[in-house]
Amino acid sequence: MFTDSFNISSLDRQHDKSIRMRIDQKTKPPGSLGQLETLATQLASILGPSSITIQAPRILVFAADHGIAEEGVSIAPSSVTAQMVLNFLHGGAAINCFCRSSEIELSVIDAGIMTAIDHPDLIQQAIARGTQNFSQHSAMTRSQAEQALLAGHEIAQTFLRQGCNTLGFGEMGIGNTSSAAAMMAALLKIPADECVGRGTGITDEALQRKLNVVARALQLHAQQLHCPIDILANLGGFEIGQIAGAMLATAEAKSVILVDGFITTAAALLAQKIAPNVADYMVFCHESNEQGHQRMLKSLSGTPLLNLGMRLGEGTGAALAIPLLRAAASFYNDMASFESAGVSV
Ligand SMILES: O=C(O)c1ccc[n+]([C@@H]2O[C@H](COP(=O)([O-])O)[C@@H](O)[C@H]2O)c1
Ligand SMILES: Cc1cc2nc[nH]c2cc1C
């Protein structure tokens, strides 16, 4: 079976006790570094317990268009996807600012933008020029869904083989909160109204339309939603499929997956349904303001590091979390122990 090609071992738990002891011997009251302690424990389990190095962290922003956008479910037309990708390539978007301010590498990937963009820094792996409108047809073919997973897997492997051990995932795609919400509903088997939110900030009227469109689409494809890949094919997006594939490759390489907002978490959920162990390698960077994100995080047992009321995407939440990963590594590696500092409580 196609999904058997992803080979992910569960996280090695044999050092849990020694990691816990090392953290508890630091000069602080037990547990006083809160979620940073949980984060350090997870990083030490993934990257090795002797010392944590966040190596060549990189954000991958996957961009693609969605046929569903023609239903009037976003504040913006599909052409904004390509315009924003050019903005990323020229260094002008929020994700560029956050990557620059925290010294993070950034790569932008065409996973299926409506119009081709010729730029030397754009990674070209479009599966097609946008998905079909999933309220009328399958978003993509089963073969395209598999191609998307494999293309994401391959590009992540390229960076991991170059020495990167931390990959953050972001996306750009007008209409993709509709696709992510529909996938969430199908993957978790819950009603559309628990999953659909305002995306880029639509009006009450557009929200009602979006809810109807997603609910109808779930009915239309109800007989075809048997497995995660069929859910991707019927309801998904090329960037969502590529992100899921890239996450699977990151876990295979025993590296750290940084999960951003609502759409990226839908990709994480898809990856987890394909290979449950992948979730061990995920750091949930922030809680988005998109209605439904909290529920999706809960289903992945994810506790987000940040809640800044953001709902931008692009990998911005992942980029903002990288300084926290560095802080967790720094206290784990360098903070004095009670014994070395001569402190006794
Ligand atoms: O990451 C999030 O939580 C998030 C929440 C709402 C919107 N977005 C971004 O907004 C776009 C999708 O919104 P929409 O309304 O077009 O479906 C897409 O480019 C995402 O990056 C992202
Ligand atoms: C302007 C704009 C920027 C974005 N960045 C991610 N999604 C976006 C959607 C819009 C509309």
Image (spheres, grey):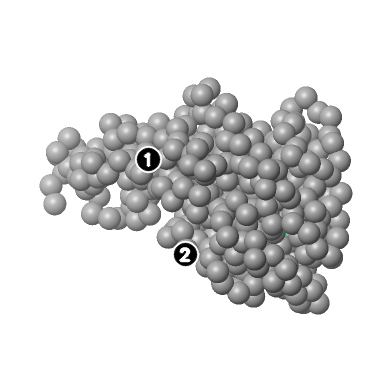
Mark 2 near ligand 1 (CB under 8 Å)? no
Is residue 52 toward the left or the right of residue 172 in the image? Answer: left
Question: Picture coordinates of residue 114 (x, y %)?
Answer: 84, 44
Q: Amino acid at mark 2?
A: Lys
Furthest toward the top, the residue is 162
Which residue does the image show at 44% across and 38% down from the upper left?
Answer: 7
Mark 1 near ligand 1 (CB under 8 Å)? no
Q: Nearer the viewer, residue 176 or 270?
A: 270
Q: Amino acid at mark 1?
A: Ser
Q: Which residue is mark 2?
A: 298
Q: Which of the marked residues, 2 or 1, is nearer the chain's N terminus?
A: 1
Is residue 144 toward the left or the right of residue 304 in the image? Answer: right
Camera-near label (2 vs 1) is: 1
Q: Is residue 206 visible?
A: yes
Which residue does the image show at 61% across and 36% down from the upper left?
Answer: 150
Question: Picture coordinates of residue 65 (x, y %)?
Answer: 78, 49
Which residue does the image show at 76% across and 70% down from the upper left?
Answer: 213
Specify few, some or many for label 2: CA neighbours under 10 Å numbering under 14, 14-19, or 20 or more.
few
Q: Which residue is mark 1?
A: 9
Q: CA distance from mark 2 to mark 1?
A: 23 Å
